[in-house]
Amino acid sequence: MMSRVHNAALALATHADRAGWSNRPAYFAGDDVWSHGQIHDLAARAAGVLHDRGVSRGDHVLLAAPDSAAWVVAFLAITRLGAVAVLVNPELTAADHRLLLADSVPRACVTDPALEERFSGHGWIDVDHLLDQAWTTAAGPAANVTPSSPLYVQYTSGTTGHPKGVVHTHKDLVLYGTSVGREVLRIGIGDVALSVSKMFWAYGLGNALAFPLHSGSSAVLTPHRPGADEIVSLIARHRVNLLYSVPSSYAALASAEAHAALSSLRAAVSAGEPLPESLGGRLRDELGIEVLEQIGSTEAGHAFCANGIGDNTPGTLGHPVPGWEMQVRDGQALAAEGELWVRGPTLFSHYLNQPDLTRGTLVDGWLATHDRVRRNPDGTLSHLGRTDDMELVGGISLSPLEIEGVLAAHPLVREAAVAAVLDHQDASRLRAFVVPAHHSPGLEDELITWTRSRLPAFKVPRTVRLVRQLPRTATGKLRRHVVRTGSW
């Protein structure tokens, strides 16, 4: 049972001590192994460093660095002080960083040394130097906060080009561990996880920080997003048994010769965008991986509907996560098929500096996810696309997901995206963009024939173009508005 301490950093440290796992490994990073006790002790000391730099309760502290033990220590140090961590992708452009600086107005910025020039006028602190100083600094004070006190700001991925600062509270971090971590994935102290998705993203924060620290398990950290070969190597080296990734990464993994090396996995979790059913089948049949698909959002903090250990229905999003309510609405009426609305315990408190948008987004405590779903007789949900992903071709509205699923089922296709693209006469034509598993002459024509034999004529792409990669956000989501331009 978790302590009733409301400060999330102090609560997790107290829980680790009382549960007796302080000496167990929490993180593997390169050749280094960090125990739970080390992480919590250094976080308390790093809080002292930040306190000496003038950071106090309520202050914003921007954190933009690659995943590492230092990142975790910095996040927990900010949390301990009752300050608010502003989690930022370190790989954004300088213009994007300036935008987020202006929006969050941080008291200090803890970043990778490579970003010093961008943040030097904003109380810049080297994240690795913060960790070094922590070894010789006394522990900082633990702020007395409430469960609803702001804990962190995480920006939406900005697929439309307008990221919003989503504010979460101290209670949320622990709830990720109890609901998804314990109830859905049954994570325990013997588990070793690898999250391809990074901690600046909601999915990665739960996978690599909340789950291990809540359960006494451990996680493998890499400063970059690993490719298929490195994923296989890390799984084999650390005997990883829980893998968290996104469909594009799983597509690359399915093309690797990796069956033996992946034998330690008891489950693999997929989120971020729909997992093509054909890809899930290939991973299961060829690599022996049971893929658990789930769906969540930055506003929800983590997953709100998920398949779990012992409760997996391939091709669906699974059941609501404990504590979450789901409604499928067609306009104002409840329906079997329509837009998904959710309500649950870790729903965000507000958008930073945008009260009108907050009021328009949270309607009577419910969040419109803008996902189209179908409620199945067994209570699971099937994803039918985004409400803003619909394509209009020849006066007919259609979802690209069905077509992409047909293309992805072809053995020579790694990934596919379909969109209505304007031609030279400004007429909307359905186009497919495909990342091939390997070069094959005539594949474009073959895929047209493939889709024509499986879909009605109005859903068959006019053209197929082979591309090296699809345009994605830093968190791996397909940037459909870029696909619709036909070039990137």
Image (cartoon, grey):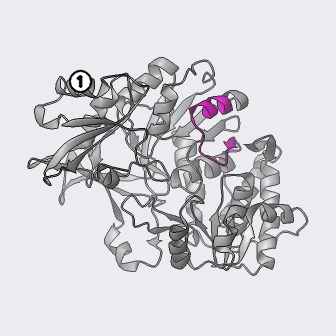
Q: Give the camera-side residue of 75 and 176.
A: 75
Mark 1, other Cα within 10 Å: few <14 / some 14–19 / many ≥20? some
> Tag 1's secondary structure?
helix
Q: Which residue lies furthest to the right in this view?
A: 136
The residue under the point 26% across, 23% down is 446
Task: Give the answer, above or below, for where 158 lies relative to 318.
Answer: below
Quarter of the view holding residue 375? top left
The x, y position of residue 393, in whole percent, is 14, 47
Residue 281 horizontal side relative to residue 451, left or right: right
> Which residue is more in the foreground, 74 or 190?
74
Residue 32 lies in what quarter of the image?
top right
User: For the magenta stretch, what is the residue range?
Assistant: 215-235
Expressed as whole percent of the image width and height from the top left, the position of residue 425 reads 13, 53
What percent of the width, then of the height, locates residue 175?
56, 55
| Residue 141 visible in the current orientation | no
Q: Which amino acid does label 1 sit on?
A: Trp
Residue 425 seen: yes
Q: Is residue 398 left or right of residue 170?
A: left
Residue under the point 45% across and 72% down: 350
What residue sits right under mark 1 in the picture? 450
**Residue positioned 46% across, 22% down in the render:** 284
**Residue located 52% across and 40% down the image:** 245
Residue 429 x %, y %: 17, 45
Q: In this view, does 116 lie to the left or right of 330?
A: right
| Count of marks overlaid on the render | 1
Tell me if residue 408 is in the magenta stretch: no
Left or right: 113 in relation to 297: right
- Above or below residue 292? Residue 14 is below
